[in-house]
Amino acid sequence: MVWALTVLAVLSLAGVIFDNIAALWQIGGVLIAAVAIADLVILRSQQIPTVERLVDPNLPLGARRPVRLKLYNPGRQILTFRVHDHYPDDFTIEGMPGNAILDGRRSATLRYTVTAKARGDHHFSATDLALKSALGFWSRVIRIDNTELVRVFPNFGELSRYALLAARNRLSMAGVRRRQKRGQGSEFHQLREYQQGDSLRQIDWKATARYQKLIAKEYREEQDQQLFFLLDCGQRMRHRDQDQQHLDSALNALLLAAHVAVKQGDAVGFMTFAGSERFVAPRKGAGVVPALLRASYDIESSTHAADFVRAADAFMAKRLQRALVVLVTNTRDGDQDDLMLAVRLLQKKHLVIVADMREPVLDECIESPVEDQRTALNFMTAHALRESRAHVHESMRHQGAVVIDILPRQLPLALVNEYFDIKRSARL
């Protein structure tokens, strides 16, 4: 249309100069109008293609996944069009928009990939088709409403890898230390003949006198214990490292630790605070990890400050049995007094792990060479923050809590290692 009108404009300018071209301009205008109208009529008579979107309703966070658009031309005319699928705002895509040419009564499939950048519920809202007319004068835009819900979960691909290693008793390949020795633990298992290397405390003297040979007690790690997570969902957990929020790292740690704990016969639950408030009572069994995944996939961090004492009061009001309570957070100077009071309250009944995540930028500022005033100020500020954190962590250790000061990406394996150490030492 633009080119046709450009030619017509040139003819009109030429008609001002040359009288004999004026008639040609009029004929050209009528001809272009007739052709354009005919092209429009043909375009409006074309049947609209159908679109079916094929996408997995459950997507892992941060992983590329395919989306297919099945297009079908119900009419007999050849259709040429451009396709744009309305994907969720928090997704990144490759391969969209796309182009398609469909013969009559034929189908085709367009493919593109999406990468989810945020957990929770998301919607594919519609698909736009820009049909091109037969002569190219017009483009007809059609919006097909095919809204579809997808749920973005923590990356269960990584969790599945850890689960497979655990199933094969090879968690050590992933960095998990499990050093349980035969005969050690805190729950009585059976009597057996004394073996070299057994502790004298394991000898059962009554059984020894009865059988006239040394008989030892064999122990195993206690079963039917509880692992409970208190997840900070406040403003500190909104911080991102390598395009992942601290809250995402916390959820990954929860799911991996839950899988390991369930394998040990323990029950797992969690409670969130500071914005999103959710409570899942401790459970054990094969369905625990999927249930936790469904209950936590859409939890979001808020802009509220964490009230640790209020969260501890709410948890203690549940009157659960003694448990290993893991409080996952990211603290600053202003949070420390409140956190210490909360830990003191939880310690009255439970064994507490404080997993305090820190930003990698602190380590980077301390390890970077001091070359000018700016880097010197960065070094001094980072050093002061780390010293303050270390002082508070040491105070909580004196109260009997276990403190993990760690980078977010290191939290899942570190937490599992600490869980095994506590189980082995029978502190719970």
Image (cartoon, rainbow, N blue to C red):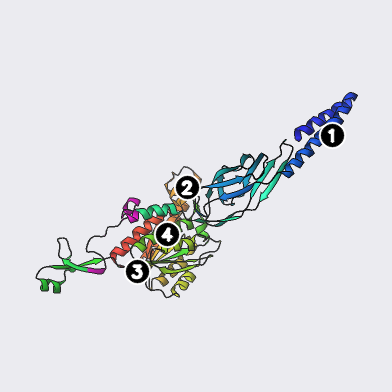
Mark pair 1, 3: CA separation: 88 Å
* Figure quadrant of residue 398: bottom left
SS for callout 3: loop
Q: Dot 4 corresponds to which residue?
A: 255
**Mark 1 secondary-structure assignment:** helix
Give me the residue at 79% from left, 35% from top.
35
- Alpha carbons under labels 1 and 2: distance apart: 77 Å
Question: Callout 4 environment at 10 Å: few (<14), some (14 to 19), or many (20+)?
Answer: many
The answer to whether the residues at label 2 and label 3 have Cβ atoms under 8 Å apart is no
Residue 157 picture location, percent across and down: 43, 52
Start and end of the magenta stretch? 165-189
Q: Name the dominant secondary structure of the magenta segment.
A: loop
Q: The residue under label 2 is which amino acid type?
A: Ala
Residues at marks 2 and 3, CA–CA distance in whole angstroms: 49 Å
> Which of the pair 5/35 is nearer the observer?
35
Of pointers 2 and 3, the one earlier in the residue sequence: 3
Q: Is residue 392 visible?
A: no
Q: Which mark is residue 333?
A: none
Pick whichever of labels 4 and 3 is earlier in the sequence: 3
The residue carrying mark 3 is: 225
Q: Earlier in the sequence, mark 1 or mark 2?
A: 1
Q: Which residue is mark 1?
A: 30
Q: CA distance from mark 4 to mark 3?
A: 17 Å
Q: Dots 4 and 3: beta carbons under 8 Å?
A: no
* Rendered image: mark on residue 376: 2
Which-is-in-front pick, marks 1 and 2?
A: 1
Q: Alpha-carbon distance for marks 4 and 2? A: 40 Å
Q: Secondary structure at mark 2?
A: helix
> What is the x, y in percent for residue 327?
43, 64
Residue 166 highlighted magenta (yes or no): yes
